[in-house]
Structures are given as C-alpha cells and as structure tokens.
C-alpha cells in the first residue's frame, strides 16, 4: 500500500494510515475508464492530498531530527575572566556655594560669593588572585602651580593574602594622620582642617604640590592581636616614599619614611601616633655666603591621634608638629626663612545624629600656626548640619567664624553649602 510501508510510514499518524488504506480499497474495487472522469474522481484527489501530506511530514521529521541534534550541541559562549567580573566603577562629586564676609561692610573689604565645583573623582577597583588594585583620577577647577585640572591620584596594587601582613606598591596615601586618609565626604566638614592641608601634603608648607596626601612608594600594613571576638586590637602601617607628592620622581637619593600605629581597645575607638621623616630635594636654599643654591631640606613630623566613630557618632582630634624649613607657597622650591623651621596645629570635632541616618549636627574648633607661635595662627570655630536624602546623597550646611592673625582684618565669617553625592 502506498505510503504505509518504509520509513515514511513511521511519519504518519494512525488516523492518516487508516485513511490512505480506505482510499486504496475504494480505488481497487471501483471500475473506471481513462477519461476526464479520472481527474474528477474524489479518491484520486484525496489521495494526492495525502501524498503531499506525507511528503510534508517527511520534511518536518527531517527538520525535527536536525533540530534535536542542534539543541544537543551547546551554543558557543565567551567565558569572562573572573578578574574582569571583579572590576567595580565608583565615584563622587562635590558641588559648593561659599561666601565670606566681614561683620561690617566696607568698600575695600575682600568679601566673596561664588558657586564652585570642588572636584569629582572616578575610581576603578578590582581583584586579581591575592592582589587588590585601584586607580583613581580627579578633576577639579582648583589649580596649584603646574597642576593639571585632571590628574591621577591613585594607582597601586596590594597583596592581601594575610590580614596581618599586606604589601602595597604604587601611588597612594601616606600613612600619616587619620583625617588625611578619610573619604572627603565622610570627613563631614566643608574642608579638611588647615593643619591637615598644610602638614600632610594637601598644599604643604614645605612647597610640595597639592597631592591629596599621596606619594609614590611601597608600604606594608596589617591588623594584629585579635581578641576573643576576632576583632584586631592593633593596626600598623609603614612605608617608603619619594617624598615629592603625586606623579613626580624623586629629586634626591633619599626616601621618606612614614608610619602609623594605633590601638583599638573597644569597637569604634582608635588611639595612635604617626611619624614622617625625610627631605625635599632640589630646593633653593641660602648658603653660608648669602647666595642661593640647590639643596635638600629635611622634614620631620609627628601626629597624635584619637577618634571614636560608631553608630553615627563621630569624635576626632589630632595634633601635628612639623620641623623643617618651608616655602609658604604651594609648588614653590624657594625656601622662605622668615616662616621659621617649625609649625604646628590641631583640631577637635564632633558629629552627632539628630535623626539617625537622616540628620546630623556638627561642630569643630581648629588652629594652625605657620611659625608655631600665636602671632602666625589661624583659628576657626565651625557649626553646621548634614542632611541625608539617601545613603549616597547629602546636603551640608556650615558657618565658620575665622580669626586669622596673619592678615590685617583678622576676623571674618564663612558660610558654606555643599551638595555631595556618590555613585
């Protein structure tokens, strides 16, 4: 019987097989003549239709067979390396309005009122095996001597296999002071304390270009002496650096040594000390004959540190002492001996929550003495509030009363508003 045997028979349903057989029986018993009635006969037409259906069924089965084979084969995929999956992009920006004004208006006073883009930073973090790495760039409209508006801040890798002993190499923050290493938004106030800016590499009195507290070098650090809960009781950091700030080679053959160590007797509390000793090369100094020449200028500093930071409560205080001639001008290499070879300063601050995770109030008192005497001091008393729209968006308000004994009009006011956000 046509279409009921062989491979194609397996392609028909039982109903189709029955129908074909009945057509064939009808054709076998019925008389017919080879005339036009042949092509009008119903069994011929129905049979032709069934043959076509059989062919279509064969083609469908062939396609299904190939489809099954195709699905059995795994599609080609591109395997993304784990180190690529580990890369994270983040950043933040700080938009500012600030005005300075005196108590009484005079035509020749130096009042200011301006909007300002303080800066923006973009950061890439990643991990390759036992190594963490980071690169960070900063854009700002505040330029120092010879500084670009966009510059590289961080570029380093750190071996992190052991918490008690980690090794970092590249360009990163010096281990000196607490506040110099705190995130600019988390720091909490409209700017770093003056003593931090002047004595930790943010526009240093020694003439170093503004480097955000960073330098090129190598460092070891670790957390040791865990208590019964596994929390480390002591942290240490020790590093060797060029001593010239960011993106600069060493100007002499001597390296700067910087180190910090602190204890953490209870959760949230840090008590410690930092030290920094080294020299700046290629400085214009005065020789014994009264002329000028290039030479090295030694630098020796120490910092006393205390901080409590827990549950939205932050209290922090630092004192920094510096010994070494300075220039008094950011980026300058010419020593200004009138400034003396000593400077110091301190600050104490408190930030407390009014509405947890929503509203904070704050206050800070700070002093910086350019020549380690009161006649060269600049003192600020600040109060304000921080309002959080969300974890990554906040609005900061601050009022500061300034007493600057290095200028004629010693007393003036600062009003600062900043919109800060992270992403």
Image (spheres, helix red, strand yellow):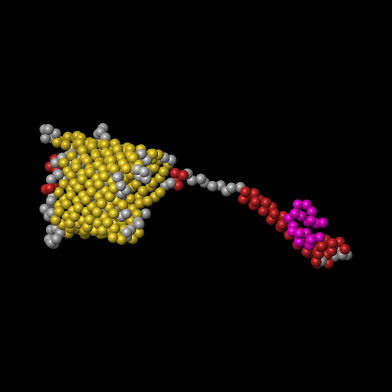
Q: Quadrant of residue 297?
A: top left
> From which residue to which does the magenta span run?
1-21
**Image-based side of 140 in relation to 29, left or right:** left
Who's the residue at 32% across and 59% down the image?
Answer: 356
Who's the residue at 26% across and 55% down the image?
Answer: 351
**Image-based side of 86 in relation to 241, left or right:** right
Out of 373 and 153, give the one closest to the viewer.
Answer: 373
Quadrant into which the C terminus falls = bottom left
**Residue 308 visible in the current orientation:** yes
Is the magenta region chiefly helix, strand or loop?
helix
Who's the residue at 35% across and 54% down the image?
Answer: 422
**x, y percentage for residue 374?**
12, 48
Compared with 159, 417 (above or below) is: below
**x, y percentage for residue 116?**
26, 56
Quadrant into which the N terminus falls = bottom right
Q: Quadrant of residue 9?
A: bottom right
């Amino acid at each position: 019987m046509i279409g009921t045997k062989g491979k194609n028979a397996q392609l028909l349903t039982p109903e189709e097989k029955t129908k074909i057989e009945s057509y064939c029986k009808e054709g076998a018993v019925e008389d017919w003549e080879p005339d036009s009635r042949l092509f009008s006969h119903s069994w011929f037409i129905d049979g032709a239709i069934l043959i076509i259906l059989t062919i279509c069924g064969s083609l469908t089965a062939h396609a299904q067979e190939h489809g099954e084979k195709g699905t059995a084969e795994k599609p080609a995929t591109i395997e993304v390396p784990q180190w690529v999956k580990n890369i994270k992009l983040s950043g933040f920006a700080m938009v500012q309005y600030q005005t300075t004004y005196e108590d009484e208006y005079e035509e020749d006073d130096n009042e200011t009122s301006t909007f300002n883009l303080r800066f923006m930073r973009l950061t890439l973090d990643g991990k390759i095996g036992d190594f963490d790495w980071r690169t960070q760039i900063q854009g700002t409209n505040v330029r120092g001597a010879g500084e670009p508006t966009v510059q590289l801040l961080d570029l380093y890798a750190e071996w992190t296999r052991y918490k008690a002993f980690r090794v970092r190499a590249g360009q990163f923050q010096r281990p000196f002071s607490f506040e110099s290493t705190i995130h600019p938004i988390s720091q909490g106030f409209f700017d770093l304390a003056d003593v931090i800016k002047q004595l930790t590499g943010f526009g240093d009195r020694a003439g170093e270009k503004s480097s955000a507290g960073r330098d090129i070098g190598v460092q070891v650090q670790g957390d040791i002496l865990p208590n019964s809960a596994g929390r480390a009781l002591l942290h240490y950091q020790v590093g060797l650096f060029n001593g010239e700030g960011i993106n600069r080679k060493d100007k002499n053959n001597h390296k700067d040594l910087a180190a910090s160590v602190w204890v953490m007797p209870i959760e949230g509390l840090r008590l410690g000390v930092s030290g920094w000793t080294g020299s700046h090369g290629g400085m214009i100094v005065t020789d014994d004959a009264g002329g000028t020449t290039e030479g090295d200028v030694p630098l020796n500093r120490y910092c006393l540190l205390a901080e409590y930071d827990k549950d939205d409560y932050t209290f922090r205080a630092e004192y920094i002492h510096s010994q070494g001639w300075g220039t008094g001008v950011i980026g300058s290499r010419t020593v200004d001996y009138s400034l003396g070879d000593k400077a110091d300063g301190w600050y104490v601050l408190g930030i407390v929550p009014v509405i947890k995770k929503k509203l904070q109030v704050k206050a800070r008192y700070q002093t910086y003495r350019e020549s380690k005497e009161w006649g060269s001091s600049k003192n600020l008393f600040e109060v304000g509030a921080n309002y959080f729209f969300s974890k990554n968006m906040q609005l900061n308000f601050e009022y500061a009363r300034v007493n600057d004994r290095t200028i004629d009009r010693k007393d003036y006011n600062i009003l600062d508003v900043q919109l800060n956000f992270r992403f």
